[in-house]
Image (cartoon, coloured by chain):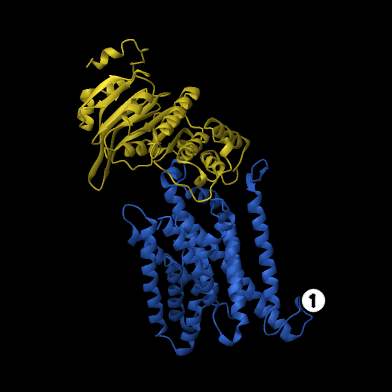
Amino acid sequence: MTHWTLRLPFVSLRLSARGSAIALALALMIAAGALLALRLGSYPLAPGTWGAILGGAGSDIEQMILLDHRLPRILTALGAGACFGLSGAMFQTMLRNPLASPDVIGFNAGASCGALVAIIAAGSAATGGTILLGALLGAFCTAVLVTGLAWRNGLQAERLVLIGLGVGFALAALSDLLLSRTDARTAADMTKWLIGTLNARDWQDVTLVWAGLALLSPMLVWLHFPLARLGLPEDLAGGLGLRLSQLRLTITALGIVLATLAVCSAGPLPFVAFAAGPIARALLRNGQPALLGAAAIGALLVLAADTAARMIVTLHLPAGVFTALIGGPVMIWLLVTQLRKGKL
Amino acid sequence: MTQPASLYADQPTRQDAPQDARLRARTLSVAYAQASILSDLTLDIPDGEITVIVGPNACGKSTLLRSLARLQRLSGGQVLLDGKSIHHQRSRGVAQRLAILPQSPTAPEGLTVHDLVSRGRTPHQSALQQWSRQDARAVEQALERTGMAPLAQRSLEALSGGQRQRAWIAMALAQETDILLLDEPTTYLDLPHQIELLTLVQSLNQDSGQTVAMVLHDINLAARFASHMIALRSGEVFAKGRPEQVVTRENMAEVFGLKCQIISDPVHATPHVIPE
């Protein structure tokens, strides 16, 4: 396995050639996928005309389709997917259990439930800010509840996963109950959002998710170093001088914020946070947390699901149906391999 | 049966005077939910020696080792590293002086030996300085000294039990600490591999003067490789000293409830337990 060493006065790194090649390939796939998604749709736009439309030369309808519909939708899909992927990989690595992703342990359900409460409470005054706040509160409360219930002389990942699953189901039921309190139209919209959809995204969603990612990325770069060591047994990580409680709190908070950003912009798309990490790690096969890989896979998964949802117009299926179609088999594969190794 | 003491009359005398110890425990106590695990332990881990901690199952050996590495919350007393309470020192600073290898550790899937050993450099690295020349050199050396260099690019799962354990030791070596704590490093190894591993630990101690403290199950191996022994019984120090002072008929009866004869190992002249 070839490695490159980078040494500058204040920075030194060791990069694997294989990892870099995979990162490059994933970046190319995202670019190609985004371009393809931009082109596809019931109103085809030839790539040759994009430049003109962006420059303001196209017809009104072309302007609207490209700038108000497809571009924000695709960018939101990529951003939300990356957030889900990062969040999932962080929790899975920290808890040393591939099942421990925010969608499995109920954090996404908490975020969407919180958002729903905010929407209903604020009524017509609901803005992106109130919804984000509600979702963050919901997710953090869920995290406190799940960890509190799972705590017994420390945290065991298996117990956390099972309790998180239960809390997630309870929160889904609570969301249904809340929906029945709203009028039929809002309820119909909300139901779609609760499955996860990227219908009618605008630039506000794009800004939310990408600004969030940009703000958090320095912390992600910083946390990658300790995260790569948290995959080791707890005593060993502690013996290497990592401050475990502090790190776990930071990683949990960051993971929750990332998952909430994604939920607010695309709804609680099932299985993206869960599947992105294991797929990325299976590609890299180097025992690393694969944060960047998980972000890329998450982005690709959501983009593919949303494009599929857009192509099958007659059915009006939300994107969440397609992420579940992709993520479900990944979960079965993981459960089978984990069970075979007796690690569940 | 001959009296054990007379057997060692012609042995090179080891120092009996109080020795320097950078790692000490003072009236150390640990309790989990009211149940006392360790009570009022006072002991030294003498510098440059191999200390082996023995005792029956559940006597608190691993808890003692974890406490010495500040991984355990104490209910009383303190652990001193270089004269200062270890729990009040920076984790990173402690990790630069003291390494611990827990019992049968597991690694993330797919991790190569080289990457694992590199993890040992953590206390010397940061998010920005992840691979200095010193890091590369220390990892190279640790791989060489444990004979793992030819297997550096293998993934851990592809190794035999003995090789895997040597890889973990290499990781602890790459940490370049003066003190090395090992919790039952020979678990799941067959006898030849146990000997191979303990010989490796012995040579590390002899070549670089690294202080070693380890928990071992096998009394005879403990007596052979230790220069200092500590026998624990239900959370208390029952005996400590040179192997021939600790491995006696009376102590074995008291600590393990084992009736036995002690003979001198004909090859290494260390005490050898023959259960009756």
Name the spot of residue A317 as percent of width and height, x first. 54, 82
Residue B66 vs A232, above or below: the answer is above
The answer to whether residue B63 shows anywhere in this view is yes
Name the spot of residue B11 as percent of width and height, x first. 35, 12
**Is A51 situated left or right of A162 in this image?**
right
> Outermost residue, top direction?
B10
Which chain corresponds to the colour blue?
A: A
Q: How many discs appear?
A: 1
Q: Quadrant of residue A151?
A: bottom left
Mark 1 crowdedness (10 Å alpha carbons): few <14, some 14-19, many ≥20: few
Name the spot of residue B91 as percent of width and height, x first. 45, 40
- Which quadrant is home to the C terminus of chain B? top left
> Outermost residue, bottom direction?
A184
**Is B75 situated left or right of B47 in this image?**
left
Query: Going 66% across and 49% down the picture, which residue do you hit?
Result: A17
**Is A22 situated left or right of B6 in this image?**
right
Query: Going 53% across and 65% down the picture, which residue do you hit?
Result: A84
The amino acid type, in three-letter code, at marker 1 is Gly
**Chain holding disc 1:** A
Q: Nearer the viewer, residue A120 or B38?
A: B38
Dot 1 falls on a residue whose secondary structure is: helix
Residue A253 vs A205, above or below: the answer is above
Residue A256 vs A264, above or below: the answer is above
Q: Nearer the viewer, residue B176 or B162?
A: B162
Name the spot of residue B212 as percent of width and height, x first. 42, 29
Which chain corresponds to the colour yellow?
A: B
- Which quadrant is home to the N terminus of chain B? top left
Q: Quadrant of residue B102?
A: top left
Residue B49 vs B152, above or below: the answer is above
Mark 1 — residue? A48
Q: Nearer the viewer, residue A84 or B153?
A: B153
Q: Nearer the viewer, residue A64 or A170?
A: A170
